[in-house]
Image (tube, rainbow, N blue to C red):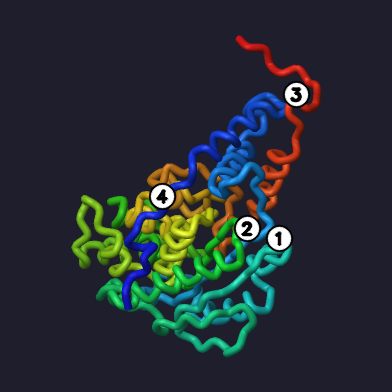
Amino acid sequence: MSFPSSWITPPQQPEARFFEQAARRQSVLTKPVGSLGKLENVAVQLAGLQGTDTPTLERIQISVFVGDHGICEEGISAYPQAVTAQMIANFANGGAAISVLAKSLGAQLEVVNLGTVSDVAPGLPGVIDAHIAPCTRNFAEIDAMTTEQVCAALNHGDATAQRAADKGCQLFIGGEMGIGNTTSATAIACALMSKNPMKLAGPGTGLNLAGVRHKAEVIISALQRHDIDDDGEDAMAVLKAFGGFEIAALAGAIAGCAARSIPVLIDGYIVSVAALIAVSQQPEIRPWLMFAHRSAEPGHQAILTALNAEPLLDLGMRLGEGSGAAAAIPLFRIACELHNNMASFEDAGVSNKEQQ
């Protein structure tokens, strides 16, 4: 199996003229320039990425990638791995937070199951079987994934982007579920950014202070075992060493959406790490990304800084699943409505600001 073309070929860049046109429209609407704050920025960015004068968010695709992690053998989670498979059923039955949010927003929701330790009932609605293995390997002892597994996960992510494109998707949201995945994400972030795990490791599923310290110590030992130095590492090598199936698939979906000119709204900590991987692999992906919220996970701000990102919301969320990105959609839609339907000073017969 080969890597998807979106992983090895830089995407086309969005056209500057659409950003410029949207910015000019914002400057003549009946309000002081900048008075709608970040809502103005959202509208301009969406218009530019969608390549239109009238940005809209009627067709949103939410894909939740699921996978289990071998690093759980090191006791780094407050929850058992059986929860991962159980949550797939919860997603399918409409009981998870992202299920409720997707229904409320009228968004398309799918779950991509890349491998769980516990069995998942066959035929669950909206669940795509993309099985790679029951879980990744324990990266405290060995690379989490083989090259073939990384390739498979990236291709599953790219296939997800193609499904979104086939549906005429106007915005893509990636989510994740996998007990142990904050440990993998933190190891990846520390390797790519040369950061101390004691600074980035957080509670994840609800670890106490002792649990967080143990988690950081496991990551420190693993970084040393994999000979990760202070100069940062190649994105593929880091992903292979520490990644989860779902993190790799997210990175593949982000790259795949950029390749197909689909804007991506980045969720919280785990998805931001996947974005960091994708941008490390192809820096030209970055313009296609928008950022929904600042996670309560302590390592998230460092990743946002590395990606030069300023998210719209800061609600203290750290659930994952794509829930923070979904929660931002009503404000994104409001930004579009204001941009498209407010009158200009000329149309309304209102005096504009005098030139200074």
Q: Is residue 176 left or right of residue 151?
A: right
Residue type for callout 3 = Glu
Depth check, mark 1 against mark 4: the one in front is 1
Q: Separation of disc 1 and disc 2 at Cα? A: 8 Å
Q: Nearer the viewer, residue 299 or 30?
A: 30
Q: Is residue 315 above or below residue 228?
A: above
**Labelled disc at residue 186:** none
Dot 1 corresponds to which residue?
A: 105
Q: Quadrant of residue 189?
A: bottom left
Asked whether disc 1 touches disc 3, contact meaning CB atoms under 8 Å apart, the reply is: no
Along the polypeptide, which appears first: circle 1 or circle 3? 1
Q: Looking at the picture, which amino acid does disc 2 mark?
A: Ala
For numbered disc 2, what is the local secondary structure? Answer: helix
In depth, the one of 62 and 271 nearer the eye is 62
Q: Secondary structure at mark 3?
A: helix
- Give yes or no for contact between labels 4 and 3 (Cβ–Cβ under 8 Å): no
Instruction: Check whether the beta carbons of the residues at disc 1 and disc 2 lie within 8 A of each other.
Output: yes
Q: Name the residue carrying label 2.
A: 326
Query: How many neighbours does mark 1 have within 10 angstroms: few (below 14), some (14-19), or many (20 or more)?
Result: some
Residue marked by disc 3: 346
Q: Which mark is residue 303?
A: 4
Viewer can see residue 299: yes
Pointer 2 and pointer 3: residues touching (CB < 8 Å)? no
